[in-house]
């Protein structure tokens, strides 16, 4: 079962995801992200602390979000990647494409959300 929570801190939309992200659940995340992209959300942070597994459909969803946000110069960060999910990002070299932060606090500082 996938759980998605959203929160806005200053001008940053934070999307917290918990559960496995796979072919069946990734459309739920995609829907939430695309709703924010339609609103031209300038800063978005995806918190994956609660995600223990992510397949290629989940990764594809995040890549699509990054591409769409770059079209209007939005910022997308990912934080709190754990274990095998981190391995997927490193093996595919996506850790060099995304802004990845150790935790939400570090991400918020880097994106000037706590200023």
Image: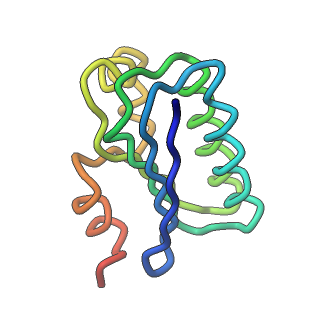
Quarter of the image where the C terminus is located: bottom left
Q: Is residue 12 left or right of residue 87?
A: right
Vertical placement of 24 versus 99: above or below? Answer: above
The quadrant in which residue 97 appears is: top left
Residue 76 in the image, given as x and y percentages of width and height: 50, 53
Residue 75 in the image, given as x and y percentages of width and height: 51, 59
Question: Residue visible at 62% across and 30% down?
Answer: 26
Total residue callouts: 0
Residue 59 in the image, given as x and y percentages of width and height: 53, 27
Question: Residue visible at 49% across and 72% down?
Answer: 8
Q: Is residue 13 left or right of residue 83?
A: right
Considering depth in this image, is 89 or 85 the residue closer to the camera?
85
- Which residue is farthest front? 1
The quadrant in which residue 49 appears is: top left
- Which residue is farthest bottom? 115
Vertical placement of 104 versus 94: above or below? Answer: below
Residue 68 in the image, given as x and y percentages of width and height: 69, 48
Question: Residue visible at 33% across and 44% down?
Answer: 100
Vertical placement of 8 versus 89: above or below? Answer: below
Q: Is residue 58 left or right of residue 38?
A: left
Q: Is residue 58 left or right of residue 84?
A: right
């Amino acid at each position: 079962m996938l759980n998605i929570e959203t929160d806005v801190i200053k001008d940053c939309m934070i999307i917290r995801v918990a559960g496995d992200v796979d072919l069946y659940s990734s459309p739920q995340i995609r829907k939430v992200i695309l709703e924010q992209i339609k609103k031209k959300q300038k800063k978005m942070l995806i918190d994956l602390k609660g995600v223990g597994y992510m397949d290629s459909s989940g990764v594809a969803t995040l890549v699509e979000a990054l591409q769409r946000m770059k079209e209007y110069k939005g910022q997308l960060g990912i934080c709190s990647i754990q274990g095998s999910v981190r391995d997927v990002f490193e093996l595919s070299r996506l850790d060099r494409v995304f802004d990845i932060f150790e935790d939400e606090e570090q991400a918020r500082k880097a994106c000037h959300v706590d200023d």
